[in-house]
Image: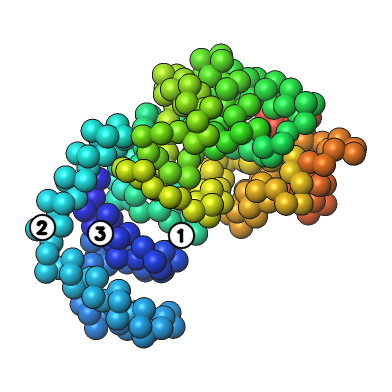
């Protein structure tokens, strides 16, 4: 937990892409918040940030400097509330526990809210994600692949969503293995509600629920949170397996995030005349790898990672 990471994220809440530029140049939130106003303005001007945005950011920075003591007290009160209401911890960018691989993605989340144990072997991590409207054939394959990989020491990362995600993660906890669920938000309820027990099973098997967003109270959430969390799923994973998806599927977002991050992207060999075959065909056409078994995936890890 780091007060500077927490406050910097609050200051740039509406301009998160700027955090990447600052972190790349100054390495830590504390150094950034200790910059003089002139240094701040110079850096933001070089990034061609609009004057009204610069003014707004400077006002928030000044507020932090003037009310640092009160903000620190508020921060620690917030932490105690998170533990009491949600049962979650905060892992900040500056903490040694922060996943190194997330420091390489776009729009770096400075704070992660975590229930459970986020530690896992990145060299043996794979995201298994895909459509909510999964075919019976793909559903069986997902279960088979997830179980075999988990039994061989791989950590399965997914989004606890309906369809492929839920199938992969429920298959892993069924054999008492670890899986990481990346959520659009953490709160005192699980979305979707039918995965309440699955979330509990993930925690009881040594896994984790993690998000960059936290709602302490009942709150309306934006659908954008669901697509934005996809960059974290692929960011945490060494390899990404995307299972089915129509041309309107939310899995397209996952595919584009994985491509931008330079991940090895896999997909199930598509079945003819299944609506979800659209995305696998696209992935293969654009250089992704079609697989059929867990052995295919293990071979890819051994030869391409």
Q: Residue furthest right?
A: 272
On residue 107, the disc is 1
First in residue order: circle 2 vs circle 1 = 2
Q: Would residue 216 appear left or right of 301 to someone viewing this image?
A: left
Element type where label 1 sits in the image: loop
Q: CA distance from mark 2 to mark 1?
A: 28 Å
The residue closer to the viewer here, 10 or 299, is 10
Q: How many C-alpha atoms fall within 10 Å of the one at disc 1: few (<14), some, or many (≥20)?
A: some
Which label is found at residue 202? none
**Cα gap from disc 1 to disc 3, whole angstroms:** 16 Å
Task: Identify the residue at image location x=90%, y=39%.
Answer: 273
Location of residue 150 with respect to 50 vertically, above or below: above
Q: For mark 3, does the 10 Å Cα neighbourhood hold few (<14), some (14 to 19), or many (20 or more) residues?
A: many
Residue, disc 2: 70
Which of the two discs, 3 and 2, sits closer to the camera?
2
Could you say which is closer to the camera, residue 71 or residue 267?
71
Dot 3 falls on a residue whose secondary structure is helix
Q: Label 3 belongs to which residue? A: 7
Quarter assignment of residue 116: top left
């Amino acid at each position: 937990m780091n007060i500077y990471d927490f406050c910097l994220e609050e200051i740039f809440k509406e301009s998160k892409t700027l955090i990447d530029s600052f972190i790349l140049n100054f390495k830590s939130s504390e150094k950034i918040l200790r910059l003089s106003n002139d240094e701040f303005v110079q850096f933001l001007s070089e990034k061609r940030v609009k004057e009204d945005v610069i003014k707004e950011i400077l006002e928030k920075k000044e507020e932090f400097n003037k009310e640092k003591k009160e903000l620190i007290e508020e921060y620690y009160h917030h932490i105690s509330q998170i533990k009491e209401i949600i049962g979650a911890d905060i892992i900040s960018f500056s903490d040694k526990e922060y996943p190194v691989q997330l420091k390489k993605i776009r729009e770096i989340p400075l704070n992660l809210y975590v229930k459970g144990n986020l530690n896992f072997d990145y060299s043996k991590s794979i995201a298994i994600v895909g459509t909510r409207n999964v075919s019976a054939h793909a559903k069986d394959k997902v279960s088979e692949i997830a179980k075999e990989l988990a039994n061989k020491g791989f950590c399965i990362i997914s989004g606890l969503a309906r369809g492929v995600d839920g199938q992969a993660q429920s298959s892993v906890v069924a054999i008492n293995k670890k899986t990481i669920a990346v959520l659009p938000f953490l709160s005192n309820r699980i979305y979707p509600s039918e995965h309440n027990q699955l979330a509990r099973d993930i925690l009881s098997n040594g896994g984790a629920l993690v998000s960059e967003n936290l709602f302490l109270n009942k709150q309306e959430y934006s659908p954008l949170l669901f697509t934005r969390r996809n960059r974290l799923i692929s960011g945490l994973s060494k390899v990404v397996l995307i299972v089915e998806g129509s041309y309107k599927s939310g899995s397209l977002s996952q595919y584009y995030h994985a491509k931008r991050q330079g991940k090895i992207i896999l997909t199930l060999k598509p079945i003819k005349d299944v609506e979800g075959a659209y995305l696998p065909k696209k992935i293969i056409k654009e250089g992704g790898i079609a697989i059929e078994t867990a052995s295919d995936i293990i071979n890819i890890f051994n030869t391409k990672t």
